[in-house]
Amino acid sequence: MKTTIQQLKALTDETRLRLLALLAHGELYISDLVAVLRLPQSTVSRHLVLLKNGGWITDRRQGLWMYYQLTPAENSLPAELQNILLARLGTIIEIKKDQGLLEIHLKGNWLNL
């Protein structure tokens, strides 16, 4: 029961939901997330830790770089819940804006951010 509560509590913040929606696009480096959300790295890192502790994301280190991605559905909460959550997030205007900014950022068009 404690694990389920921790997993669900990780979803109770707007920034963490925005992060999940961004990570639905695939593995991202923390600077990608900072650029899109326009938040300090320390703030983004703190939210990522809570999502990781809740089992929603995983990370990997490559040298000094830290990459984040969604935990595969079969390894986290039931795939059905993850799919419902991501589908719902995709309908929210703020999330759509974040996704547009991410696409611009990943194309290297920094001037439009």
Image (cartoon, helix red, strand yellow):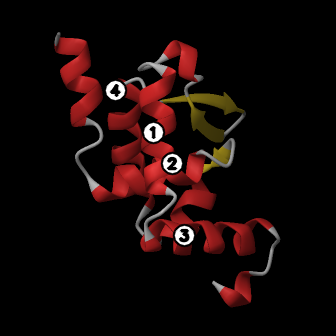
How many other residues sit within 10 Å of disc 4, few (<14), some (14-19) or many (≥20)? Answer: many
The amino acid beneath tag 2 is: Ala
Measured in 3D between alpha carbons, the distance from the residue under mark 4 to the one under mark 3, in whole angstroms, is 24 Å
Camera-near label (2 vs 3) is 2
Quadrant position of the C terminus in the picture: bottom right
Q: Nearer the viewer, residue 16 or 78?
A: 78
How many other residues sit within 10 Å of disc 1, few (<14), some (14-19) or many (≥20)? Answer: few
Residue 75 drawn above or below residue 90 = above
Mark 2 and 4 residues: CB-CB less than 8 Å, in contact? no
User: Which badge, 1 or 3, is on the more N-terminal residue?
Assistant: 1
Q: Which mark is residue 84?
A: 1
Mark 2 lies on residue: 87
The amino acid beneath tag 3 is: Lys
Question: Horizontally, is 23 left or right of 5 in the view?
Answer: right
Question: Horizontally, is 97 left or right of 93 in the view?
Answer: right
Residue for point 69% across, 88% down: 112
The amino acid beneath tag 1 is: Ile
User: Which badge, 4 or 1, is on the more N-terminal residue?
Assistant: 4
